Amino acid sequence: MAGKGMEKAKGKLKEVAGKVTGNKRLETEGKTDQLKAKAREAGEAVRDRVKGIRDSLDRDK
């Protein structure tokens, strides 16, 4: 998927900009974007692992 790390980078940029300017809302929004990206990556990892297990079980039949 193109731009996999873009959401994390965007979140980090917002977080830093919020810290520099003293804007707590922007800082929190950046942290939230980073957490969403991490959750999406974790979901993709689980999906890939399940697919691998399923494929290995199908080969055994």
Image (spheres, rainbow, N blue to C red):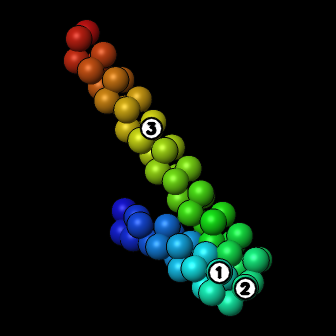
Say which residue label 2 marks: 22
Q: What numbered label is drawn on residue 61?
A: none
Say which residue label 1 marks: 19
Amino acid identity at mark 1: Lys
Q: What numbered label is drawn on residue 47?
A: 3
Contact, mark 3 vs mark 2 (Cβ under 8 Å): no
Closer mark to the observer between disc 3 and disc 2 = 2
For residue 51, which quarter of the picture?
top left
Amino acid identity at mark 3: Arg
Say whether residue 3 is visible. Answer: yes
Closer mark to the observer between disc 3 and disc 1 = 1
Q: Residue at x 77, y 77 (%)?
A: 25
Q: Residue at x 40, y 64 (%)?
A: 4
Give how far across and how far down residue 54 sits, in percent. Answer: 36, 23
Q: Secondary structure at mark 3?
A: helix
Q: Alpha-carbon distance for marks 3 and 2?
A: 39 Å
Relative depth, front residue between 22 and 47:
22
